[in-house]
Every structure is written in structure tokens, then in C-alpha cells.
Image (spheres, coloured by chain):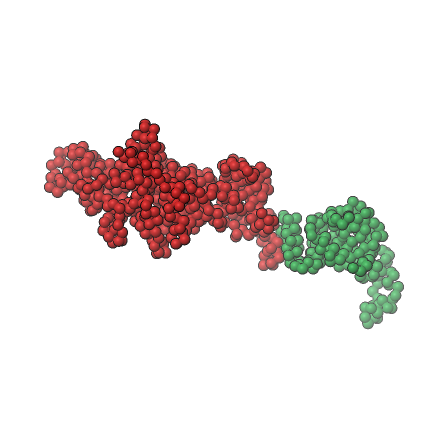
């Protein structure tokens, strides 16, 4: 296995989520994908629930620059400073952690370390983490994201691809959701229709 | 048991319930409700006890009531798979009937359940060994009658226990009562020291009978030639069928007593006054001569007797019509060459069961007359023998089982208190005589008699009254009612009562194929061969 490629760095952190700035502009991990970073004595797993590209200065709005350009790439060629003035980042919900190779699907004792590197999880790691699906209620109950259902659906679609029989995994995950959402048939129905 | 096998038998978990209503079981999501059927046995593993029960109902439930109003879109296969067993699930009603010990080495047999398993106890399909623990293995006194639904385990009836009380076989026409009765009689011959007297109205038990598929099946005489004798009322019928009966029954006029006429009142359309007139005649001429004397009076057209004894002309004519009907029966003769009762008892004392075939006389009047007349005398003789044996402290005569068909004719509430059959059902157990009643309208049988029947075996019944009558006094009646009404119309029967620890629905064992006869013949172990030495003394 090759050396893992870091994709971002934690710049804001709490027990339940972290914000990471990507090294490459406009190159953010997909919604619902799984990332990992370092905590105190443990590895922390998160699921990307929102990502954005914006100005590095909160007060300074980005202006449109492509009126004269023939292609979008020309905009960057004509304005090389843009790469330094803009940044891409994403937020991830913490869904579990691992310590001494054991996986725990609940919040770690302490948040991810600030400036710790963030890596995308490999398919094997995703598969290993999703052997149990107890963490799904962390996403369902989350108040951080405006569309937890979208995040769950995106994550399950993404995780199912790491299995040889994606359908089987989706049924298992669907049943887990059905238990959690047993009194909310409509919400369950809407998530299942996105799978 | 491997993990895989456990998964295959796991049914669900207990979620609620009570001892009287039964427990509710949430069906395991991996199971489809369509795979579970009413009447199947389940075992529930509690903390200390293992419960044995029967599925009595299956229902569909939803966790979220809104699912009923806005059903999920099951046209999407994923949604269909997800909601089954989670949002919506199957619920089973299980009646725990017995506790069976789950501890190895514990020899205590099954006990009636006096409590229920705890919440979330695991429920599984009963294993072969569970069923065997409850119903016992086929042995020298247990006779295999059939298998539970969807199982291969043999359900056995303890024939020795069975014959100690009167029993009933019920079911509407064409549901297999005759086959079942034939099997029970074979069981008695094979596994117990019982002799039977069978009043065979439709000639189905002695020689060959026919199955619904129109192929011939062997009768008792063919299977047990040494232990069964066929008596016949109708020689001509025997000649037509090319069989030879062991004895041709003739009944003398002198054997018919006024009590017999009382029994025939409804079948001969006699009025109460006509029956009273019979008693009057018997008082005048004597119990053994009244019939001949009356017939002579009719022949001579003498009306003086009637007016002398205050018998109205209408009554006299009514009696005349009734007695003329009796005269049609060729087995009635002025004086019988041999006493039938003595002959039957002789056979019985030698351990031979007697099948009395009615031949062409499949008339209910003939049946009521003969069955009642013979049984009353046999009852008297048996009672006498038991009394003698009791006072002399010697061995009592062996159990006798009298089989009657169309039982409601003998045991209906109006006459059951007067007939001998009502008496046997109520008290003859003490005198080693019991009955096997076969009927298609159990609601016509006196309640008191029904309540005295030890074991009831019932095929499909669909009349509400009949079902209620059969199930009177059984615990879990409403649950069993659901089971009974769902029986298949052939080869299935619900058995409950004295000879079994709990009610059971069986697929009745096969009867009629060459293979089946191998097991149905006389027992090779010699368990049921009788020792008649000494018994003859009783007959003087």
C-alpha cells in the first residue's frame, strides 16, 4: 500500500465535528465520504457533511472575473493571485474513533487535534468501519447539518460501493434506519428513495 | 445444533401476553409470515423453563400507525425489503400449553404451563426432540396416529390410556372419520389388551372398504384375522360380497323388550301412548312373549284386547305400523337359533373383537334396534362379571370398547338419559366398558355425554354449533376454534383430551398403501397377544 495522501488539515475542532481546509483549491472530498484524522491517542473518523470554496478574508467578497475569458481555466491564468486568495474547506461529523485497532462507534473522549492532517479513508477502512451501523443515529440526530438525510443517503451510496453486493449492504443499513426512524415513516421513505 | 440450523428454526421473540390469552411473538425479520402456519408447534426458551405451545393466530402489525395510512412504496425493491420485519412485522399468538424441562437428565415429564415465558424470550419451531418429549415415542402402548403439520415427528396416542374412557371421533361427512376410526381400532388391537365391538352400519370396518379415491383398503379382519370376527345381519349381502362371516346374527322376537321400543320411538314414529301400550302388553304377556303375542293379535284382527286395556284405536294402529316396519327386517325371527349376546361375549372373552356388519340393513331403525338391544345385554353381563371379579378379588374382564356410528341418534338430550349408551358414557368406565362414538353432528349429542368423553378427535367441522360443542370445556377454546376451522378437509384432525398432554393437529398417517399395511398388522413384539387362561372361568 502506498503512502497515504493527506488532503486537508483540521482548522476548527470540537467533539462532534471538525472543519478542515483542503490543500488544493476546489478539490474537496465528496459529500458523505469518510475521512480520518488524529485525536489524542486515537484515530478519529468523520463523514463529510458540507464543503465550500470561499474567500480567505471573511469580509471580502469574490467578484466575477470571466467576462473576457474564453474558458474557465483562463480566469485562473489571467489572475494567478486567486489561488492564494481563495480556499476550499469541508466539515465532517465525527462518527467514531479507533484505538489499538479497535473501532468504537461513538464520540472520542477528546476532539481531533488542531492542525492534524486529514486523509480520505480507503475502501477497506470504510468496509471495516461499516461492519456495524450503530453510528447512523449520530448523523440522524445531528443538528449541525441542515440535511442529515442527504448526508446519510450519500454516505450509504458511497459505502455500498466498497461491498461486493451493494444491495445487501443497503438493505442492512435500511433496516438499521428503520429501527431508528420507526416512528417516522415519511422520513425513512424519503431516505430510502435516495439510495 | 449449528448456528445455521438455529437460524432456520428461530421464529421470533416474546413481546407481550398472558397465560389465559397466550403470548404474542414478534416474528423474526428474516421470516416471512407466509412460512408460518396456524397449528404449528413452537418452543419458547425461558430463563428456567422451556415452554411448549402452539401457534393459534398470525397478524400483521406496524410500528408506526402512519404506515397503514401512507404505505411505503414497496414497488421499490429496496424499500420492500427494508420495511419488512422493521416498520411492519408479523405477530404470532402462541398458546403456551406445557413446560418441558430443558435440563438434561431431568426426567420430569411435561407439565401444564402455569406461567408464561419472560419478555423477549426466544421462540423457535419445536424440534423433533421437543415433540417427542411431549407426545412420547412409539412403543408397546403408544400408537402412531400421524405427524404434526410440517413435521416428520410421529405423534403417538397412548392406547391404554385412551381406552380407559369413552372417546369421540367427529367431523363432517367426507373428512376421513372412517379412516381415522379404522386406525384407532387398529391401534387398540395392536397396542392394548382391548377388545372392540363395532356396530358397523355401512360395512366399512370388517372387510374391505373403499377410499374416496375409489381404491380398496383392507378391513380389520384382513389385517388381524386371528383377532377379529365379523358378524353379519345380512347373509345375502355376504354372498354378494363373496365373504364368509363368522356368525350370522338372528334376533328373536322374544329378545325385544319394551325398552328397545322406547329407543325406537322416534325412528318408528311411535307416539308416547304407543310406547306405553307396549309396556302394557309386556306386563300382560311377559317381556319375552309380548311381541309375538301382539303380532298374533294384529294378524287375527282382534281389537278386543285394545279396548279392554284402554288402548285407543289410533294408538293401536300407530303401534301396528311401527311393528310392521320391524317385521321387514329379516334378521328378526320368532325364535333365534343361537343367542347372539352370548356368542359375542364368548368371542370377546377369547380376545376377539367383533365387527357387526349390517349388510343391506343400512336403515337407522335397524341400527338403533340392534345396537341398543345387544349393548344393553352386554352391559348387564359385563357388569355382572366385574362385580363377581371384584367380590372374588380376581382379575376383571379386559377393557371393551363399543364403537357406534351416528351417535347423536343414541345420545341426543331427549333419550341419552334412558339409553344404555348414555349410561356407558357416564359411568361404565368403572365396569371396563367404554365407547368410541363417531358422529358428524356433535351438537346433537347430549352435553353431559360430551363432557364425559375422554379424548376427542375431530376432523373439519364448519357448523358453529358443532365446533362449540366439541370444544366445550377445553382451555384455550377460542384459539383452538381458529385452528379447527382451518383444518384441511382431508387427512387432518385435531386431537385433544385425556390421552394427550396437549391438543395436537395431526396429518393422519397413511392407510391403504402396501407400505402402510406392514406397520398396521399385528404387533410382532407380542406385547398385545392376550393371555386368555383363566378368563374362560368367568363365563361359567
Q: In what quadrant of the picture does the C terminus of chain B appear?
A: top left
Give how far across and how far down residue B347 sits, in percent.
29, 41
Q: Is residue B247 left or right of residue A114?
A: left
Give how far across and how far down residue A97 sits, in percent.
76, 49
Q: Is residue B202 left or right of residue B175?
A: left
To which quarter of the image does residue B49 belong?
Answer: top right
Is B169 placed above or below B81 here?
above
Residue B321 seen in render = no
To which quarter of the image does residue B229 belong?
Answer: top left
| Chain colored red | B
The residue located at (28%, 37%) in the rendering is B378
Give how far across and how far down residue A94 sits, in percent.
76, 50
Residue B80 seen in render = yes
Which residue reaches farthest front?
B533
| Chain colored green | A
The residue located at (43%, 46%) in the rendering is B144
The residue located at (71%, 55%) in the rendering is A127
Judging depth in this view, the residue of B276 and B43 nearest the camera is B43
Give how far across and how far down residue B521 sits, in percent.
37, 48
Judging depth in this view, the residue of B73 and B260 nearest the camera is B260
Amino acid at each position: 500500500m502506498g503512502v497515504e495522501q493527506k488532503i486537508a488539515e483540521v482548522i476548527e475542532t470540537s467533539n462532534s465535528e471538525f472543519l478542515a481546509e483542503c490543500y488544493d483549491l476546489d478539490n474537496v472530498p465528496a459529500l458523505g465520504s469518510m475521512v480520518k484524522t488524529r485525536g489524542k491517542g486515537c484515530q478519529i473518523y468523520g463523514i463529510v457533511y458540507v464543503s465550500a470554496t470561499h474567500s480567505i478574508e471573511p469580509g471580502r467578497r469574490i467578484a466575477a472575473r470571466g467576462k473576457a475569458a474564453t474558458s474557465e481555466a483562463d480566469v485562473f491564468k489571467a489572475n494567478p493571485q486567486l489561488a492564494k486568495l481563495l480556499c476550499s474547506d469541508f466539515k465532517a461529523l465525527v462518527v467514531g474513533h479507533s484505538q489499538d485497532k479497535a473501532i468504537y462507534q461513538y464520540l472520542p473522549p477528546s476532539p481531533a487535534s488542531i492542525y492534524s492532517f486529514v486523509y480520505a479513508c480507503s475502501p477497506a477502512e470504510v468496509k471495516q468501519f461499516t461492519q456495524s451501523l450503530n453510528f447512523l443515529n449520530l448523523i440522524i440526530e445531528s443538528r449541525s447539518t441542515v440535511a442529515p438525510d442527504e448526508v446519510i443517503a450519500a454516505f450509504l451510496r458511497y459505502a455500498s460501493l466498497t461491498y461486493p453486493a451493494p444491495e445487501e449492504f443497503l438493505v442492512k443499513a435500511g433496516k438499521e434506519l428503520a429501527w431508528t426512524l420507526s416512528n417516522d415513516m415519511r422520513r425513512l421513505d424519503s431516505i430510502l428513495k435516495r439510495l | 445444533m449449528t448456528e445455521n440450523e438455529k437460524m432456520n428454526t428461530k421464529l421470533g421473540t416474546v413481546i407481550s401476553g398472558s397465560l389465559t390469552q397466550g403470548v404474542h411473538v414478534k416474528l423474526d425479520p428474516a421470516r416471512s409470515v407466509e412460512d408460518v402456519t396456524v397449528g404449528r408447534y413452537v418452543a419458547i426458551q425461558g430463563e428456567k423453563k422451556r415452554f411448549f405451545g402452539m401457534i393459534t393466530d398470525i397478524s400483521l402489525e406496524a410500528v408506526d400507525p402512519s404506515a397503514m395510512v401512507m404505505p411505503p412504496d414497496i414497488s421499490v425493491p429496496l424499500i420492500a425489503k427494508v420495511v419488512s420485519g422493521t416498520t411492519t412485522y408479523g405477530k404470532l399468538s402462541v398458546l403456551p400449553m406445557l413446560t418441558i424441562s430443558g435440563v438434561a437428565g431431568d426426567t420430569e415429564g411435561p407439565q401444564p404451563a402455569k406461567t408464561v415465558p419472560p419478555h423477549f424470550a426466544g421462540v423457535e419451531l419445536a424440534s423433533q426432540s421437543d415433540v417427542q418429549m411431549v407426545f412420547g415415542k412409539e412403543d408397546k402402548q403408544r400408537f402412531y396416529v400421524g405427524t404434526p403439520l410440517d413435521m416428520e415427528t410421529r405423534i403417538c396416542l397412548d392406547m391404554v390410556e385412551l381406552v380407559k374412557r369413552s372417546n369421540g371421533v367427529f367431523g363432517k361427512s367426507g373428512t376421513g372419520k372412517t379412516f381415522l376410526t379404522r386406525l384407532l381400532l387398529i391401534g387398540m388391537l395392536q397396542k392394548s389388551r382391548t377388545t372392540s365391538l363395532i356396530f358397523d352400519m355401512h360395512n366399512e370396518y370388517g372387510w374391505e372398504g373403499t377410499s374416496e379415491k375409489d381404491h380398496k383398503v383392507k378391513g380389520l379382519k384382513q389385517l388381524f384375522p386371528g383377532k377379529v370376527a365379523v358378524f353379519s345381519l345380512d347373509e345375502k349381502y355376504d354372498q354378494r360380497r363373496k365373504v364368509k362371516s363368522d356368525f350370522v346374527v338372528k334376533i328373536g322376537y322374544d329378545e325385544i323388550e319394551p325398552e328397545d321400543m322406547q329407543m325406537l320411538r322416534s325412528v318408528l314414529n311411535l307416539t308416547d301412548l304407543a310406547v306405553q301400550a307396549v309396556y302394557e302388553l309386556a306386563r300382560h304377556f311377559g317381556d319375552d312373549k309380548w311381541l309375538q303375542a301382539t303380532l298374533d293379535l294384529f294378524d287375527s284382527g282382534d281389537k278386543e284386547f285394545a279396548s279392554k286395556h284402554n288402548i285407543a284405536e289410533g294408538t293401536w294402529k300407530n303401534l301396528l305400523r311401527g311393528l310392521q316396519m320391524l317385521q321387514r327386517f329379516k334378521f328378526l325371527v320368532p325364535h333365534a337359533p343361537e343367542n347372539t349376546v352370548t356368542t359375542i361375549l364368548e368371542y370377546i372373552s377369547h380376545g376377539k373383537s367383533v365387527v357387526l356388519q349390517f349388510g343391506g340393513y343400512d336403515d337407522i331403525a335397524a341400527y338403533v334396534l340392534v345396537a341398543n338391544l345387544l349393548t344393553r345385554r352386554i352391559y348387564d353381563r359385563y357388569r355382572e362379571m366385574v362385580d363377581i371379579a371384584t367380590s372374588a378379588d380376581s382379575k376383571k374382564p379386559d377393557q371393551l370398547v363399543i364403537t357406534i356410528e351416528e351417535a347423536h341418534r343414541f345420545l341426543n338430550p331427549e333419550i341419552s338419559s334412558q339409553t344404555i349408551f348414555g349410561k356407558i358414557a357416564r359411568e361404565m368406565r368403572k365396569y371396563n366398558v367404554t365407547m368410541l362414538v363417531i358422529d358428524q353432528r356433535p351438537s346433537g349429542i347430549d352435553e353431559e355425554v360430551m363432557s364425559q368423553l375422554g379424548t376427542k378427535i375431530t376432523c373439519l367441522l364448519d357448523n358453529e354449533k358443532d365446533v362449540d360443542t366439541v370444544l366445550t370445556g377445553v382451555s384455550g377454546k377460542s384459539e383452538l376454534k381458529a385452528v379447527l376451522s382451518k383444518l384441511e378437509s382431508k387427512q387432518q384432525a385435531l386431537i385433544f383430551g385425556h390421552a394427550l398432554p396437549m391438543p395436537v393437529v395431526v396429518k393422519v398417517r397413511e392407510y391403504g398403501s402396501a407400505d402402510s399395511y406392514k406397520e398396521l398388522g399385528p404387533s410382532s413384539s407380542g406385547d398385545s397377544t392376550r393371555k386368555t387362561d383363566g378368563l374362560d372361568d368367568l363365563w361359567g
